[in-house]
Amino acid sequence: MRPGKRKRLEKLGWSVGDTAEFLGLDEVESKLLDIRISLARLLRATRSRRRLTQFELAEKIGSSQSRVAKLEAGDSSVSVDLLVRSVIAAGASASDLAKAVAGKRK
Amino acid sequence: MRPGKRKRLEKLGWSVGDTAEFLGLDEVESKLLDIRISLARLLRATRSRRRLTQFELAEKIGSSQSRVAKLEAGDSSVSVDLLVRSVIAAGASASDLAKAVAGKRK
DNA sequence: TGCGAATATGTCAGTTCTGACAGATGTTGT
DNA sequence: ACAACATCTGTCAGAACTGACATATTCGCA
């Protein structure tokens, strides 16, 4: 893993343990993290395409601007539930969602 | 919505309000619920195919058998995070996951 | 440059989700 | 019928996540 990427992830609250990760001991968490990152990207892309502000999207999902910012930033304090909810509310299609989960770049 | 399905969902802790749902006021929650159900089905199918017991899968994800049962039952007390984590741990492929999220039957 | 709008970051009390446990209810083989 | 195993259902204290708020930073644009 690139040191840059690693640092970025740790800033967001993810502990990227070299041992476990490198040895593939925690493949599941790694895959889940990829999904989280994809969803965060999809969220930003979708909201942006729909020309919604974070504040407007927050209203749609009954949340706050700051939480949307965290969602898009891939902060660790945010659940996949809310991530998916937001992506849907932003107006992403089912296939966009599927692609994100499958790990395919748009 | 079929009355049977409705009753089943309510048993699991989901409030399926006719008004909101019928008027499509809460399309987002409805879509999220579909995803949850798909993931629950995928989890059971995958675990079963791999011949894992609920107990064994629980160990893999550091959880308990009872929670796995709830995951597969589509209980409302369970998060999408854990659902996805479990599906991955059970050994589902990325494309299986994508299909579930896209709402397509296997 | 300065100003307003959008976004980012930090904190926190209240809510939700969690693993663990107990016990009930299948299921399978003898 | 019985035992052994698997699954289901309910409960609860502790952990994780939440919206709200304050505040900082970045981004146009005149």
Image (cartoon, coloured by chain):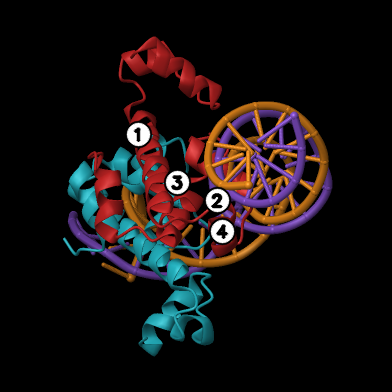
Chain colours: A cyan, B red, C orange, D purple
Quadrant assignment for the C terminus of chain B = top left
* Mark 1 closeness class: few <14, some 14–19, many ≥20 residues within 10 Å: some
- Which of the two discs, 3 and 4, sits closer to the camera? 4
Residue linked to disc 2: B54
> In this image, D29 relative to C8: left or right?
left
Badge 2 density bin: few <14, some 14–19, many ≥20, Cα 10 Å = many
Q: Which residue is mark 4?
A: B56
Residue flagged by tag 1: what amino acid is it? Asp
Give neighbour class at mark 3: few <14, some 14-19, many 20+ (Cα, 10 Å).
some
Which secondary structure, mark 4?
A: helix
- Indicate the position of residue B37 as horizontal and vertical percent values: 39, 36
N-terminal label among 4 and 1: 1
> CB under 8 Å between callouts 4 and 1?
no
Question: What residue sits 35% from the left and 39% below the top?
Answer: B38
Q: Please report the residue visible at 35 percent of the width from the left and 41 percent of the height from the top.
A: A57
Separation (CA) of disc 4 from disc 2:
5 Å
Mark 2, secondary structure of its residue:
helix
Q: Number of callouts in the render?
A: 4
Residue underneath mark 3: A81
The answer to whether marks 4 and 2 mark residues whose Cβ atoms lie closer than 8 Å is yes
A19 lies left or right of C25: left
Residue type at numbered disc 2: Gln
- Using residue B62 as the reference point, say whether residue B90 is left or right of it: left
Q: Secondary structure at mark 3?
A: helix
Which residue bears the numbered disc 1? B34
Which mark, residue A64? none
Percent of width and height locating residue A102:
25, 59
Asked if disc 3 and disc 4 are in contact, CB closer than 8 Å, the reply is: no
